Amino acid sequence: MRFGESNSTTWFQTLIHLLKSNIGTGLLGLPLAVKNAGILMGPLSLLVIGLVAVHCMRILVKCAHHFCYRLNKPFVDYGDTVMYSLEASPISWLRNHAHWGRRMVDFFLIVTQLGFCCIYFVFLADNFKQVIEMANGTTNNCHNNETVILTPTMDSRLYMLTFLPFMVLLVFVRNLRALSIFSLLANITMAVSLVMIYQFTVQNIPDPSHLPLVASWKTYPLFFGTAIFAFEGIGMVLPLENKMKDPKKFSLILYVGMAIVTALYVSLGILGYLHFGANIQGSITLNLPNCWLYQSVKLLYSVGIFFTYALQFYVPAEIIIPFFVARGPEHCELVIDLSVRTVLVCLTCILAILIPRLDLVISLVGSVSSSALALIIPPLLEITTYYSEGMSPITIVKDALISILGFVGFVVGTCLTLYELIQPSSAPIFINSTSAFV
């Protein structure tokens, strides 16, 4: 049985947290992802990946319930569930190395969450750079088709370094309750921004007949990495369920919440690509016209992403910092804690500087870690948990196919993204405000 804690959440609060854990920068990159798959193949693939991702979340919850009942525990997290499933495996080698299951999950969680943080640096730098460079030509007229002469400013990597000290100060806030204030601010600013983005993309959509139904197979792995990155909220599923007053309602909330997320992803992916066509950039905010209304949308969403950085940073900090604190003198605990936080933020900034293309960072993080957490591990988890108790061959084949899909996406997506980083086929697209009206 699952036991809610004293500070339990209502079903509505849980739904809001579920939406927040899935909606971030990945959503804004989906129009480019649809371009990499095709106007027909992209939305269909997004729908399939969404269904598979939700199914894998449900598998994780079911396996966690199984071990809660079996071991009489009130709660087990993702790492615990994988470890206990390996201990229940009929293969002795897996049972003897079960603790590596927890470490593997922790590793991918760290890579995923710090990958989010890297993407936030790139996103902030790109959007602030564009707003500042267009400032002299920014008008109050959002429908006038005029070319804006950009005022060159510093390199985007210098913008990242400018944000670095503010990010460090932000992650010094160690209390999760205090971070919830930042989460509320992020939710409000991002919600307002998304309404404005939708309002713009549904207007004056050009003839879509020139857009390919199916894009080149060479760019499809980039689509896969971006799509699975966007759906990667699986790490938050078990903590959210455990915080509920009535955990029995969680399955319904999971399906409703992910249906909303999938509808949002598919609609913005289609509308963004239909509106901007081949000119679509790594984040749809970079395509918005150069008037103060839409420049403020970029800034609002950027404020939301800035505050969300601390929330995404919280998970790897909780895994990494205790390791170093336990090995240092007791009177230096605070100094070690803050030092490790500073080093980790600097690391995410350095990695963002090394890979300043937003679309490739998103695809790389999605292919490497999100594939493992969202697609590869959950089906294998179901097999190791229930195999000794009897499973139907259909379930085993289904789980094997999902894991193979995730593994192929992991290998091909990672290799292609790395190849694109080393030998880019084309330079990143940079456009002026007139492209929003072409």
Image (cartoon, grey):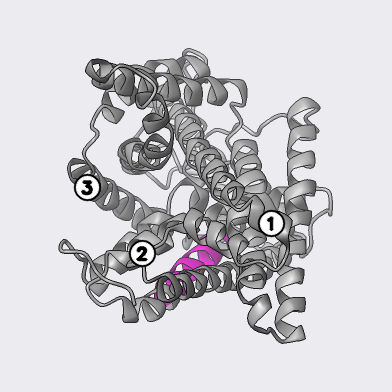
Label 2: few (<14), some (14–19) or many (≥20) C-alpha neighbours in 10 Å: many
Q: Is residue 48 magenta?
A: no
Q: Secondary structure at mark 3?
A: helix
Q: Which residue is tagged 1? A: 94
Q: Is residue 260 magenta?
A: yes
Q: Nearer the viewer, residue 381 or 292?
A: 381
Q: Which residue is tagged 2? A: 75
Residue in view at x 49 percent, y 70 percent: 263
Residues rendered magenta in the picture: 256-269
* Closer mark to the observer between disc 2 and disc 3: 2
Mark 3 to mark 1: distance in Å? 39 Å
Residue in view at x 32 percent, y 80 percent: 249
Q: Nearer the viewer, residue 97 or 412?
A: 97
Tag on residue 180?
Answer: 3
Instruction: Give x and y (percent) for residue 259.
Output: 47, 74
Hey, what amino acid is under mark 3?
A: Ser
Q: Earlier in the sequence, mark 2 or mark 3?
A: 2
Q: Is residue 229 left or right of residue 24?
A: right
